[in-house]
Amino acid sequence: MKKNVFSLLLMILVIYSCSNDSNEEQEEEMLQDILVEVLLFEFIADTGNDSQRLRYEIEFTNPNGVDIRGGYEITTNADGLVSTQFFSTNAPCTEIGANSDCTISFDEEEPFEQGLATVQSIELVSAKYVVVE
């Protein structure tokens, strides 16, 4: 009987003394932040063709060894009105491969007569990538 109790205690000690790999796995699964570089941001209030033009290029770099999925947020300030647009479904760069990058581009010219309001300035406040998977 003492031998069975001793064996049982020994087995319990062995089980509880094993290292917990779940903490190590969680550390390995932590993703590095996606790097954002604004390659171009330009707003022309009056192109000389009775229109205004906004264009930008932003590069997102995935420094992780795994593919990522997500979306990006672009926050702008147009004459004091700050707004954020979130792009995810059917937008470019919703998937970025491991250790690679992806660039979004926007280039639109709008005639004054089509616009709801004439904007004097647009500034980029921030651009960031949000990982969902």
Image (cartoon, rainbow, N blue to C red):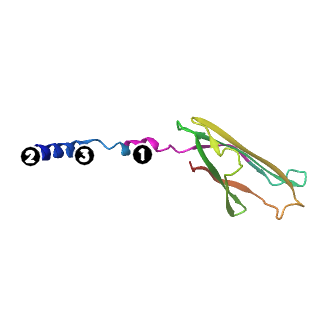
Mark before the other along the chain sequence, 1 or 3: 3
The answer for how far apart the CA atoms under marks 1 and 2 are is: 41 Å
User: What segment carries the magenta color?
Assistant: 24-41
Disc 1: which residue = 26
Disc 3: which residue = 16
Graded by Cα atoms within 10 Å as few (under 14), some (14 to 19) or many (20 or more), the crowding at tag 1 reads few
Residue at the location (60% across, 46% down)? 69
Q: In this view, does 115 lie above or below 35?
A: below
Mark before the other along the chain sequence, 3 or 2: 2
Number of dots carrying numbers: 3
Mark carried by residue 2: 2
Label 1: element kind: helix
Mark before the other along the chain sequence, 1 or 2: 2
Residue at the location (83% across, 64% down)? 116
Q: Which of marks 1 and 3 is in front?
A: 3
Label 2: element kind: helix
Amino acid type for the residue under numbered disc 2:
Lys
Graded by Cα atoms within 10 Å as few (under 14), some (14 to 19) or many (20 or more), the crowding at tag 2 reads few
Between 94 and 117, the one lying in front of the other is 94
Mark carried by residue 7: none
Q: Position of residue 51 (x, y in %)?
A: 87, 54
Residue at the location (84% across, 61% down)? 115
Q: Does the magenta stretch include residue 38?
A: yes
The answer for how far apart the CA atoms under marks 3 and 2 are is: 21 Å
Between 7 and 26, the one lying in front of the other is 7
Amino acid type for the residue under numbered disc 3:
Tyr
Q: Where is residue 102 in the image (x, y as percent from the top left)?
A: 66, 39
Between 23 and 75, the one lying in front of the other is 23
Label 3: element kind: helix
Residue at the limit of the structure toward the front, as seen here: 1
Amino acid type for the residue under numbered disc 1:
Gln
